[in-house]
Image (cartoon, rainbow, N blue to C red):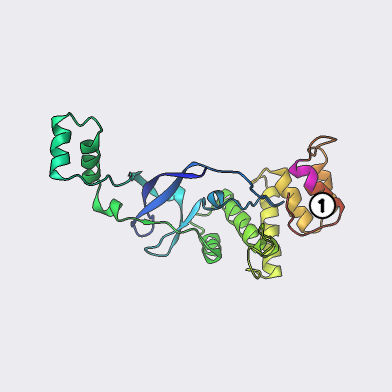
């Protein structure tokens, strides 16, 4: 069962607005569909991002750059005069007075904080232009997400409908992003041979993908992502595939 924990109150690095960062307590991975590029249909996992869109200034920022102010607990049930008096006389055994005191001590800005927004494609493209905060490792995160979004029109939900009705990027822009992500692999910024092989496969460089996957694919055992992607490469298939 997927459950959310108390959100973290953070400050937007750009406008200093108080925001809420969602936190997961547990994730339900039942009936999760995963594709060859590493993307999945698990909504809880997809709601997690290293980047955030601020609903206040509409800027995009990295969670790692935001100041953390503390957790925001759920607002406790209100107490009337009788229940407050009873709790005092009985030693507040249920801790309700303590909960009320803790809630009252929380700044109003934190209580009124808005939740951050999951970045859309324009936010991702904007993050790529932010040279002041874009490290090579962060660039890999952004380009991987753009890669996933650029393939969403090729993915199918369990009912057969596409995740997106149309491509969000042109074929040229999609290839340029994929080549840039491949270069990060070549520079050892990213060390994931399966992902690198998948990029090579989608670029039509099948022999390179197969050579990279052969040492790590299963041999007579239960197929793993590496062996499945290698089979796709052997079949000269360039589209994103369900694993």
Q: Is residue 93 left or right of residue 56?
A: left
- Spot occupied by residue 212 in the image (x, y as percentages of width and height): 80, 44
Q: Residue at 64% x, 52% y: name it.
A: 39
- Spot occupied by residue 128 in the image (x, y as percentages of width and height): 55, 60
Q: Is residue 208 visible?
A: no
Q: Residue at 69% x, 62% y: name it.
A: 160
Disc 1: which residue = 232
Mark count: 1
Q: Is residue 46 visible?
A: yes
Towards the viewer: 90 or 57:
90
Q: Is residue 68 left or right of residue 145?
A: left
Towards the viewer: 130 or 213:
213
- Is 226 contained in the magenta span? yes
Q: Is residue 216 left or right of residue 8?
A: right
Q: Quadrant of residue 144?
A: bottom right
Residue range corresponding to the magenta coloring:
224-228
- Spot occupied by residue 67 in the image (x, y as percentages of width and height): 37, 48
Q: Residue at 78% x, 54% y: name it.
A: 201
Element carrying mark 1: helix
Q: Is residue 136 left or right of residue 62?
A: right
């Amino acid at each position: 069962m997927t459950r959310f924990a108390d959100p973290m109150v953070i400050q937007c690095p750009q406008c200093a607005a108080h925001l809420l960062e969602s936190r997961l307590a547990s994730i339900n991975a039942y009936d999760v569909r995963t594709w060859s590029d590493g993307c999945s249909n698990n909504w809880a996992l997809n709601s997690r991002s290293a980047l955030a869109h601020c609903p206040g200034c509409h800027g995009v920022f990295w969670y790692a750059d935001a100041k953390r102010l503390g957790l925001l607990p759920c607002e406790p049930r209100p107490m009337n005069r009788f229940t407050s008096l009873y709790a005092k006389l009985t030693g507040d055994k249920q801790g309700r007075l303590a909960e009320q005191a803790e809630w009252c001590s929380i700044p109003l800005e934190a209580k009124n904080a808005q939740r951050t927004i999951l970045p859309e494609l324009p936010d991702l493209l904007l993050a790529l232009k932010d040279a002041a905060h874009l490290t090579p490792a962060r660039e890999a995160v952004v380009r991987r997400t753009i890669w996933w979004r650029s393939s969403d029109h090729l993915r199918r939900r369990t009912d057969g409908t596409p995740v997106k009705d149309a491509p969000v990027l042109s074929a040229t822009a999609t290839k340029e992003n994929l080549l840039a992500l491949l270069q990060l692999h070549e520079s050892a910024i990213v060390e994931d041979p399966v992902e690198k092989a998948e990029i090579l496969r989608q670029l039509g460089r099948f022999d390179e993908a197969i050579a990279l996957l052969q040492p790590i694919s299963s041999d007579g055992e239960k197929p793993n992502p590496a062996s499945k992607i290698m089979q796709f490469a052997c079949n000269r298939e360039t589209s994103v595939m369900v694993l």
